[in-house]
Image: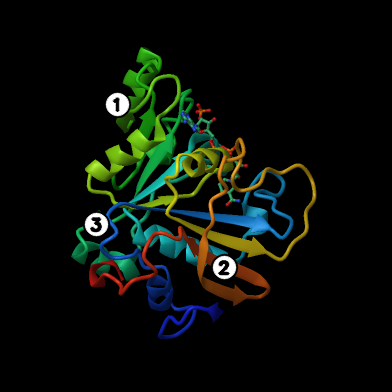
Amino acid sequence: MEQLIGDTPGSPGSLEWLAQAYAYPSGAGRWLRANMVASLDGAARLDGLSEGLSSEADKRIFGVLRALCDVVLVGAETVRAEGYRPGRVRAEFAERRAAAGQLPAPVIAVVTRSLELDLSAPLFTEPLVPTVVITTVDAPAGKLARTAERADVITAGTGSVDLPLAVAALTERGWRRQLSEGGPRLLGQLAADGLLDELCLSVAPLVTAGDSPRIVNGPQIPHARPMRLVSLIEEKGFLFTRYLRPTEPDRSPSDPALT
Ligand SMILES: NC(=O)c1ccc[n+]([C@@H]2O[C@H](COP(=O)([O-])OP(=O)(O)OC[C@H]3O[C@@H](n4cnc5c(N)ncnc54)[C@H](OP(=O)(O)O)[C@@H]3O)[C@@H](O)[C@H]2O)c1
């Protein structure tokens, strides 16, 4: 692994080095980062899943980003398609999470209108920390009650989840280091609502064509949002980019509690 842009000290590729390279900015308050993978021609999935676009290094970075965050915000279709499991404890990160006042594993927060979730899956039966379900105020009462037996339910918005409200509710719970793992339709709304502080995009050295959506899928944003490249890592032809919104501080001196 080689960092082509950025100057993270230490041993490239090690967990410690990656934790520094992707440290949440200190003093930034709530920070929402998205982590996605795409092919060279912009596909967000291959044969219906992101797995075919990923690599060992991509999974390593994926794992580190999870280990650094308080909460993973994810759309219900990604949970269903990818068979989401609960966040797990990583021994290598246990001490730093405890020192930073974080729960031992990140909370998984699922955004859904339909509440069509498999409540018998480990995500709801075996989480180390309760899974959060974010839905609408007018969600069907019966389904809502059944979901509330297995998950910590947040309601925000009528008809559709109001994402600024949802993100604020997560922040109020003290979960300010936020990570969205998509999918593309959720990310489209987060981008349109101006909630994305950072995008970590892995670019796979593959050309796929086909009709896969892009990583951000939704109506065009009226004013395209510029982003600023702060880190570029390469391994085996894969590129791992880290872009921040321009108005936010650069990767400021890391909060020791976060690295
Ligand atoms: N390339 C990558 O890095 C990457 C990352 C993640 C996923 N993926 C792929 O992307 C695909 C899934 O992504 P997707 O874009 O189709 O779906 P998604 O964004 O994961 O989920 C969409 C679903 O989330 C819920 N939702 C989203 N916004 C909502 C709102 N404002 N209010 C209420 N509910 C809301 C709805 O759930 P309900 O239907 O339950 O109402 C909606 O159907 C999968 O193929 C997955 O493998 C790729």
Q: Is residue 132 visible?
A: no
Name the residue nearer the viewer: 217 or 237. Answer: 217
Report the disc number at residue 25: none
Location of the C terminus by quadrant is bottom left
Residue at mark 1 to residue at mark 2: CA–CA distance: 39 Å
Using residue 168 as the reference point, say whether residue 244 is left or right of it.
Answer: right
Do labels 1 and 2 touch, CB within 8 Å? no
Instruction: Identify residue for label 1.
Output: 149
Q: Earlier in the sequence, mark 1 or mark 2?
A: 1
**Picture quadrant of residue 188:** top right
Residue bearing the label numbered 3: 102
Q: Horizontal and vertical percent for residue 162?
A: 40, 30
C-alpha distance separating marks 2 and 3: 26 Å
Residue at 42 percent across and 61 percent down: it is 65
- Identify residue type, mark 3: Gln
| Left-right relation of 226 to 130 | right
> Which residue was labeled with disc 2?
240
